[in-house]
Image (cartoon, rainbow, N blue to C red):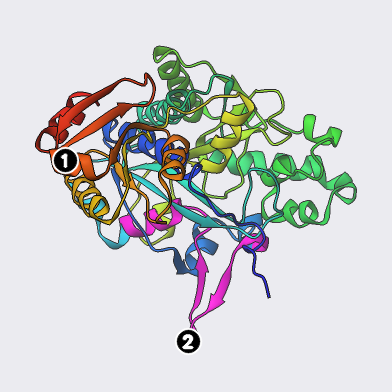
Amino acid sequence: MTFKVPRGTQDILPGQSEKWQKIEGVMRHLSNLYRYAEIRTPMFESTELFQRGVGDTTDIVQKEMYTFEDRGGRSLTLRPEGTASIARSYVEHKMFGYPDQPVKVSYLGPMFRYERSQKGRYRQFVQFGVEAIGSKDPAVDAEVIELAMRIYQECGLKDLKLVINSLGDKEVRLAHRDALIKHFEPHIGEFCSDCQNRLEKNPLRILDCKVDAKNPLLGSAPKLTDYLNEESAAYFNQVKNYLDVLGIDYEVDPNLVRGLDYYNHTAFEIMSTSEGFGAITTLCGGGRYNGLVEDLGGPETPGIGFGMSIERLLLALEAEQVELDVDNQLDIYIVAMNEAAKEKAVELTSSFRAKGISADIDYANRKMKAQMKSADRLQAKFVIVLGETELEEMQANVKEMATGTQEQVPFHDLVNYLQSHK
C-alpha cells in the first residue's frame, strides 16, 4: 500500500524549503524593525471562539472549518485564521493593561480551511500576519499597510496593487445594511443559495460573493462610502492622507468588504497584477476590527491587522520570474581515499562546522570519482582530497572549484584559510 499527502496539503522538500526560510527571514526582520513582537498561539481553539470572532455567517465558519470533539466532549477547531486567537490571548492575558499601547504582535504558522484545492491555495497553508491592538489612530492603519507592502517588495515583487475601502462604524453599517436589503430583496431569487441566506443575516457579504460576481446588481448596489458619517469619512481621509505621506499608491474600491464579520472602518487587499498569476489575484488582506475584543469578553479596544499566505507569495514570485537570493552555499567537501583518511575527514568536518563553516563528506563509501561528482552536484566552494600522502604531511590540497586553483594548507591552518576565503 502506498500513501500520499492528504488532498490540499503539500510536502516542502529540500531545494524549496530554503525559499520559505528566506521569505520567513524577511518577515521576521521587518517585524522587528516595525516592533511587532512574535506571538505563538495553539493550532486549535474552542470552536465557539471562531463562531463568535470570525462570524457565524461567514463561509469559513459555515463551510471550511476543521472541527472535532475531543475525549472530554469539547468542540475544538483547527485555527482557520490568526486574528481571533490573538484577540483571545490579548483578553486572557490582560494585555489591555500593558502601559504601552497598542500591543503590536506578529505570528507565523499553519492555518486550516476545508476549501477547494487549487494552485496556490491549500487546506493547510502557512500564514504570516500582524495585529496592532489598542489604538484607533489612523496612522497605525497606514503602518500596517506599509509593513505588508514592504514584505512583498523586499522579496522582489513589483506587480502589486493596493485596494482600500472604508466599512464605516456601527451606525454606518446599519444604514448601509438596510439599503442593501432593499436593493437586493426584489431580485434575491436570482442569486445563489448562500446569498439568499445572507440577505437578512449579513447582506454586505453578498458583495463579496464569487458565484454571483458578474450579476449587474452588484455593480449598482448602494456603496458603503456613500453612507459614511462625518466621523467615518474623516477617519478614512486620514488613512488615505498617511498613505500619501508614505508614498504608497492605492485605489479605493467601494465593493471591497473582506470575508470576515469583524471588519469595520479600514479594509484593504494587496493584489498581484502580474500576467499569468491567475484569476484570484489577492495576496494579502486585512483591516480594522474595532469591537472584536469586546465580543470576546474584553474591554472596548480597537485593533487592526493583516494576514498573508506564503504559498500565494511564492506563486507571485514565480509569475514575475523572481529568483530569491537563497544562501545555501556548501563551503567545503572532503573526499576521503581510505579509512584512515575518513577518520581525519570526520574530525576536520566537525572542526569546520564548529567555526561556522559548512562542510560535508561522503557517507556511502564511494570511490574518489563518485565523491568528486557529489561535490560538484552540491556546488561546494572548496574540495579537499585526503589520502596517505596528505595524512603523512599533515596538510591538505585545497581546490577552489570555480577557478580550479589549488593551495597546500597545513591541517592546523585550514579553519583560518577557509574563514578568510568565505
Give the class, few, some or many, for how many residues have Cα within 10 Å of label 2's Cα (few <14, many ≥20).
few
Residue sitting nearer the eye, 310 or 191:
310
- Res. 352 visible in picture: no
Q: Position of residue 235 (x, y in %)?
A: 45, 27
What residue is at 43 percent from the left and 43 percent from the top?
129
Point out the stretch of residues depicted in magenta: 62-90
Q: Position of residue 158 (x, y in %)?
A: 54, 19
For marks 2 and 1 on the same chain, the one whose residue lies earlier in the sequence? 2
Dot 2 amino acid type? Arg
**Is residue 298 magenta-colored?**
no
Q: As drawn, is 198 to the left or to the right of 121? A: right
At a point 68% along the width and 56% down the height, the residue shown is 115
Q: Judging from the image, what secondary structure is the residue with disc 2 in?
A: loop
Q: Seen from this angle, which residue lies furthest left?
A: 412
Question: Most extreme residue toward the bottom, as rendered?
Answer: 72
Q: Work out which quarter of the rendered image holds the N terminus and state it.
A: bottom right
Q: Please report the residue visible at 38 percent of the width from the left and 54 percent of the height from the top.
A: 87
Residue 355's tag is 1
Q: CA distance from mark 2 to mark 1?
A: 50 Å
Q: How many marks?
A: 2
Q: Residues within 10 Å of mark 1 (few under 14, many from 20)?
A: few
Q: Residue at x 55, y 54 (%)?
A: 11
Q: Position of residue 323 (x, y in %)?
A: 52, 26
In the depicted structure, whether residue 333 falls above or below residue 251: below
Q: Is residue 62 above or below residue 37?
A: below
Q: Amino acid at mark 1?
A: Lys
The C terminus sits in image quarter: top left
Q: Which residue is mark 2?
A: 71
State whether residue 57 appears in this view. yes
In the rendered structure, the answer to whether residue 291 lies left or right of residue 199 reads left
